[in-house]
Image (cartoon, helix red, strand yellow):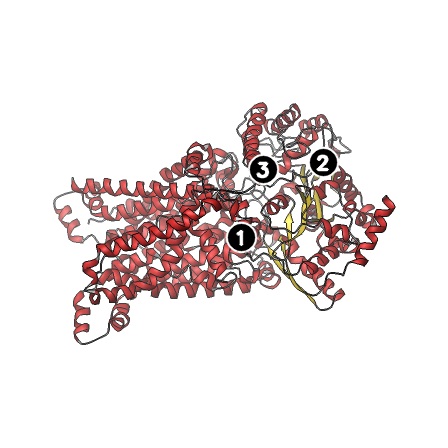
Amino acid sequence: MKKFLITFALLIPLSLPALPIEGEITVWCMGSEGNSIPALARDFERENPGVRIHTQPVPWNGAHDRLITAVAGNIAPDVTQLGTTWVPEFAAMDSLLPLDSMIEQSPDLNKDDFFPSSLATAVWNNTTYAVPWYVDVRVVFYRSDILEQAGWDHFPETWEELERMAAKVTRDLDGDGQTDQHAINVSGRDEALILPFIWGAGGSVLDDTNTRVIIDSPETREALAFYQSLFKRGFTTKAESGQIDQFQAFRDGYFLSWITGPWMVGEYERRLPDLEGKWKVAMVPGKKTRSSFLGGSNLAIFRQSKNPGLAWAFIEYLSRPDVQMKWYQITGDLPSVRQAWDDPSLSKSPTWSVFRSQLEKARAVPAVECWEAMAEEIKNEMENLVLGGTPPGRIAEKLQKSLERIMDGRRSGEGNLARRGFLLLVLFPLLLIAGIFILLYRIRHELTSWRKWITPVLFLLPVLVHLTLFMFLPILASLFLSFTDFDIYSIGDWRKTSLVGVRNYLRLIMDPLFWQAVFNTGYFIIFAGPLTIGLALGAALLLNSPKTPLKGFFRTGYFLPVVTPLIAVAVVWRWIYSPRHGLLNWAIGLFGMPEQSWLADPALAMPCLIILAVWKNFGYSMVIFLAGLQAIPPAVYEAASIDGAGRWHTFRHVTLPLLRPTMLFITIITTIGYMQFFAEPYVMTEMGGPQNKTLSVVLYLYKEGFRFFHLGYASAMAYTLCFAIAVLSFFQLRWAMRKEAM
Amino acid sequence: MRDYSLPARISIMAILVLLFILAVIPFLWTITTSVKTEEAIHSWPPKWIPLPMDRGHYGELFERMSFARNLLNSIIVTISVTAVSLFMNALGGYAFAKFRFPMRGRIFGLFLLTMMVPAQVTMIPVFLMLKSMGLLNNYLGLVLPGAVSVFGIFLMRQFMMSIPDSYLESARIEGCREFRIFLTIVLPLCQPVLAALAIFTFTAVWSDFMMPLIVMHKESMFTLPLALANLSGQHTARWGLLMAGATVTILPIVVIFLILQRRFIEGITMTGLKG
């Protein structure tokens, strides 16, 4: 039988007409792969004259959203690199070409060539939608020199050993009360760091068939407790990546080990040449097994591809062991094909053999399309675990419940929109026509004198057409969406959408995260609003006093933050708030205050963003206040002065009342702007961390809409927000008018 | 008003200077770090003077990456959106300010209401529409949606209301056509508010991140904020390189602001914003 199969397999490629390898395709690659892929594309073009490979680099952050919008917009590339966790999602959207038959027919490719956990990331519902391109696996990088001095000739292999080692090396070297040598550096937010511990204890998120949530187990609880103890006992730093310079910290021995990926080998060799020979890698310590997190990237073909033959040929080429080796030499990406690992440059190296052993024991995240949402829950609970100190048992229970809810939320089959669609098709135009008729009827008297108003209408027409297209229709479209369950399944096939009435709105009211976002937004407005306005008014008053020199100079300085792009100033503010070697820690250090972890600290993160927002925005209000102040005629002040009014009296009873209109305008503008508070946490706190303490309503909306593509739910949130803004502005106006009247 | 006493004046100065330092320091830090050597960047306590200078980061940005092209994209997009939207908003504002027509108040109110709608609401429908028009990866894909702003219409209307009707009437009596009146009389009178709105639009478009993110999918079409986000994603802690990218993004807008700031402040003062 086996022999027969092999013969059969050999025969197929001969018996089938070869798919044509000609024409051109577009290939999207993320991050640094995007910059390196042209080299291989040129080689491939040389081997296959007449073909053209267009490569397109895509930044990792935003890549997921970009791919989804590309699929929705029918402008997806032929071949794309996909993060290992993304395959199920894009397969569920029915956007990827199934590759099983192509792999079976391929003379060069065999499923056994790949590491099993790596191949598992490319399979969804028993169908293979991608081919592993490269793998990465997290291992421990550690300072062998310092550990050796402390009496450890190898990195701990078990948790008990790790604990003993950590207790010994975690120290306050200079005696200032701050730990400046941590045993390890694990994250309170990255699920790739906690999963190895859960797996290592023998626990798992889903069962083997990926259908049942089994995260609440004694094994998981044990792993969570251990992970929590790393934080409780101060063995790990509390800084998240991007908040400290990891290289510098590793060089200084601020932390002695951390779990990270193979890309760090090259980075260390290049950027820390002075540390050569002082660091080593080791497998992740375990309880039952030394598991780790397997990631990497797969290659997939979109259904939209017009040239799947060439696309497949290119994927086959990239999977050839010699090409995989070449790719490794260019980028350092580890081959997904086992044969490539026999190359002496990998098999003979002590570093890479550790990776190879870890690869065989590593696991990937379960291949389910709702993984992103699950990972989000895990991240949130991780923060509660390490920052909030919630007991592990409680965390495990909560995770079990929330992950089950996500699993149950998956749908299949037809929605009811197609069936009820005809109703809408009739109703919607009817309503529209009725509306126009009512309108025309109401202005019928004016219609006879059309000459009078045809001119203004012509002036208004371009604006009206534009706003209808880009504002009113989209607003209506998303209003409609808010009554449906439109999500990624609908993007693949709109018939899977159902009308759900007000269910999205009901769910919103019951969603604790939404209320957390409302609270955060309120917190932000209540502090940032008055601070911005107060600072602006103060600065304006000082600048307005007649004897102040260099007015223009100061005004310019205060206004500078207003004109600069947030994304650009965020770079420097991230450094200002960096927990290590950050400017703010340096500044408070001058006053002898202890270092803080700022954006990583749940209590401080929001104040940090408030300061940033006040800094960025007060200049705008100040300029408007200045204008308001200058409009107050000097005679008024003279009169006050003659009446013997003091400075405070003049301000309280002359300046302030005359400034009221300006004040009202600024208050409304600032409140509306701050209610839509979004960009600051988007760029500064990795989408609303820590512990969702900086998650704003608009950010939550964005996440639901463009990360998880729950467009129906997100639209409902958008409308709720609109409503809130309208109500608030209304009351502000009413309040102001009442005061005016008094 | 009476003069402040000397100590009061000194303390006012002190506050102003302190505020100035706080407002400006992040920019100084950005610019100086961008020309520091790697060694100086990592020195602790921080080094404020970037000597010796190292322009390597800029070399990397412009030679190995596509920042020159991204800069050009930003300039093209920003200038076109500003020019087109100025004209369109002026048209709209003029209609509301100087003419009576049925439902004027309601239409204007409806326009103002859209200012409260978060941009995220319209994003997906707008994206699908641009795609069906084939405008993705195209400058027009950014220029078209940005061509009208309700805030701009509002601003223009407020200002134009202050233009006396008699100017327009006398032109009409002389037989001037309506569009000519708009071009030759109204627009020149609006110069201050046009300048203010121009700078306003310019800064907003220059800083915009969301629209380019969904419209531009090719690196050669990225605007600077996108390119910078791309850079931060790839090199998380390479402060020198990131700061150089931030400087390239910040500097043009700052220079323009410094040159035109007087107009901007005049413009804001003269629009009815004060009440």
Q: Secondary structure at mark 2?
A: helix
Q: Secondary structure at mark 1?
A: helix
Comparing marks 2 and 1, which lies closer to the viewer? 1
Of all residues, the one furthest to the right in this rendering is A3
Q: Amino acid at mark 1?
A: Ala
Circles 2 and 1 on the same chain: yes
Q: Which residue is mark 1?
A: A72
Foreground: disc 3 or disc 2? 3
Q: CA distance from mark 3 to mark 1?
A: 24 Å
Number of marks drawn: 3
Three-letter code, disc 3: Ala
Whether residue B208 is visible: no
Sequence-earlier tag: 3 or 2: 2
Q: How far is the residue under mark 3 from the one under mark 2?
A: 35 Å
Mark drawn on residue A146:
2
Disc 3 is attached to a residue of which chain? A
Residue carrying label 3? A375
